[in-house]
Image (cartoon, grey):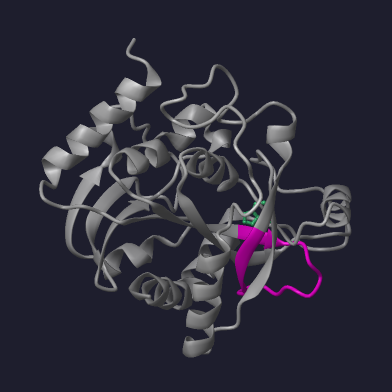
Amino acid sequence: MPDLYDQINTAANYIRSRAPQFQPAIGIILGSGLGALADDVTDATVIPYGDIPGFAPSTVVGHAGRLMLGNLGGRPVLVMAGRLHFYEGYSLQQVTFPVRVMHALGIGTLIVTNAAGGLNPAYRQGDLMLIADHINLPGMAGNSPLFGPNDERLGPRFPAMNGAYDPELRGLARAAAARLDIPLREGVYIFLSGPTYETPAEVRMLRTLGADAVGMSTVPEVTVARHSGMRVLGISTITNEAIADEAGGSANHSEVLETANLIGPRLRALIAAIVAG
Ligand code: HPA
């Protein structure tokens, strides 16, 4: 079995062979129901995950499972339409493998999007939230993609995580949102492994921990991106308000997808503006 470093380079070489001469600068991961942004990519080379050595297929409804290399807002980008999640049974190394490959392809900036539940009582369904920071709850219990022997060729043993969500990129995002008249929240995203939504007691607990939004993705990818030295920008779509009492309704995946589809155009416009700079 080749080691992770060789697997990453095999995948990167395969992608280069499918889009020779194309040098992506920015990687974009599209969250649940946000795949429509892929339609904005022009002159795209589309590669199903199944074609790429080492890529696991996406098994979740709302996640297409295609890599697209093309232009967005005048910049060369690589878009992951459909991500992999820990709850699908993949290891965190598998979940984050595409981010490693992006880095190997020379991509220096990663934009991650996701669907999230709003914990902050001021947040409403349909809000967009710039991620200012995160809490890696599974990571604290040993579920980190960096767990195990460290390959110094990929990054340092003990990467710093302050400033993980690049202050300068966040400034660009705020400015782009203001120009487009798109309201933008800014808060802390907490990662849970899922796949259950939260109990009301858990929602109350997560609020006391200082989290504004909760979801089942993003943090492992950001951890690996920072390990590799990539700059990161994260945006959550608040697809539902987390339920803090037993009398509330229930979160469900159709509602999450429906709301993500509704917010999609605003997020698409925002990302195109950020990428265009
Ligand atoms: N909880 C966890 N993950 C989510 C939610 C939620 O309420 N909404 C979308 N993803």
Q: Name the quadrant containing residue 9.
A: top left
Q: Is residue 127 above or below residue 253?
A: below
For this view, does 13 lie left or right of residue 147? left
Residue 119, image x and y in percent? 77, 62
Q: Is residue 25 above or below residue 4?
A: below
For this view, does 37 lie left or right of residue 194? left
Q: Give the quarter the ligand 1 occupies.
A: bottom right
Bounds of the magenta segment: 116-132
Q: Residue at x 36, y 23 (%)?
A: 5
Q: Decide whether residue 122 is among the magenta residues.
A: yes
Q: Name the quadrant containing residue 241.
A: bottom right
Q: Is residue 266 above or below residue 211?
A: below
Residue 42 appearing in the image: yes
Q: Name the quadrant containing residue 219.
A: top right
Q: Decide whether residue 42 is among the magenta residues.
A: no
As drawn, the residue found furthest toward the top would be: 1
Residue 178, image x and y in percent? 54, 86
Numbered marks: total: 0
For this view, does 59 lie left or right of residue 139? left
Q: Residue at x 60, y 67 (%)?
A: 130
Q: The N terminus lies in which quarter of the figure?
A: top left
Q: Which of the pair 62/130 is nearer the observer?
A: 130
Residue 22, image x and y in percent? 16, 52
Residue 272, image x and y in percent? 37, 73
Q: The C terminus lies in which quarter of the figure?
A: bottom left
Q: Which of the pair 154/261 is nearer the observer?
A: 154
Q: Residue at x 56, y 30 (%)?
A: 145
